[in-house]
Amino acid sequence: MLMLEPRTAPPAALQAAVPVLAVVLTMIAGGILFAALGKNPVEAIRIIFVDPLLDPFSRSELLVKAAPLTLIAVGLSFGFRAGVWNIGAEGQFIIGALSGGAVGLAFWDVPGLWLLPLMAVAGMLGGFLWAMIPALLKISFGANEILVSLILVYVAELWLSALVSGPLRN
C-alpha cells in the first residue's frame, strides 16, 4: 500500500531552487503574455528584469520603492508566525504616509531637527491606528480581519486621493 509521509524539512536544494524557478516561470508567463499582445517578449523581459539593475537611476528608484515594502514584509512575518492575518498592510502604509506627510506640511516653515522624528512617529501612529480597526472589529464583533483589512486598503486609497487633491495639496 502506498503511504504519503510528510517531510521533516525540505531539502536545501529545493529551498534554493523554488525562488529561482518562480522568477523563471514568471518570465516565461510574462513573455507569453507580451507575445500575445504583439510585443517583443525578450525586450519586455529585459526592460522589467535587467534594466532596473544596470541603470544607476533605476537602481536607486528600485531601492526607494523596495525599502518600505521590505519593512512591511518583515513586520507582517511576525504576525503570520503568530497566526494573525493582515492582508491590509498597504492601507496601513498609506495612512502612515499620510500622517507623516500631514505633520510635515503642518510644520513646513518651522526649523528644527525634531521634525523628521515627529513625522516618523506620526506615520507609525497612523499606521498603528489603521491596523487597530480590523483588530477591534474582530474582538468586538467577530469580523473577519482578512476581509476588513483588505477592504480598508481601498478606503485608505480613496482617502489618500481625496486628501492630496484637497486639504493636503501643496
Image (tube, rainbow, N blue to C red):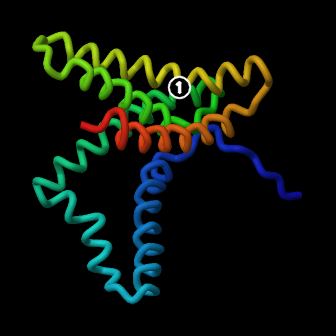
43 sits left or right of 88 in the view: left
In the rendered structure, the answer to whether residue 167 lies left or right of residue 73 reads: left
Task: Characterize the local packing of mark 1: few (<14), some (14-19) or many (20 or more) Cα atoms within 10 angstroms.
Answer: many
Using the rendered view, name the quadrant where residue 115 is placed. top left
Q: Foreground residue, 147 or 126?
A: 126
Quadrant housing residue 152: top right
Q: Amino acid at mark 1?
A: Trp
Work out which quarter of the rendered image holds the N terminus and state it.
bottom right
How many dots with numbers? 1
Residue with the most extreme right position: 1
Q: Quadrant of residue 155?
A: top right
Residue 12's spot in the image, x, y percent? 47, 46
The image shows residue 15 at horizontal and vertical percentages of 48, 48
- The residue to which callout 1 is attached is 130
Residue in the image at 19% along x and 57% along y: 53
The image shows residue 102 at horizontal and vertical percentages of 32, 25
| Residue beneath the point at 79% across and 25% down | 142
Q: Nearer the viewer, residue 66 or 127?
A: 127
Q: Which quadrant holds the C terminus? A: top left
The local secondary structure at tag 1 comes to helix
Q: In the visual, does 76 lie left or right of 110?
A: right
Figure check: 131 above or below 164: above
Residue drawn at x 56%, y 45% as measured from the top left: 10
Give the residue at x 13% y 12%: 113
Residue 110, image x, y percentages: 14, 14
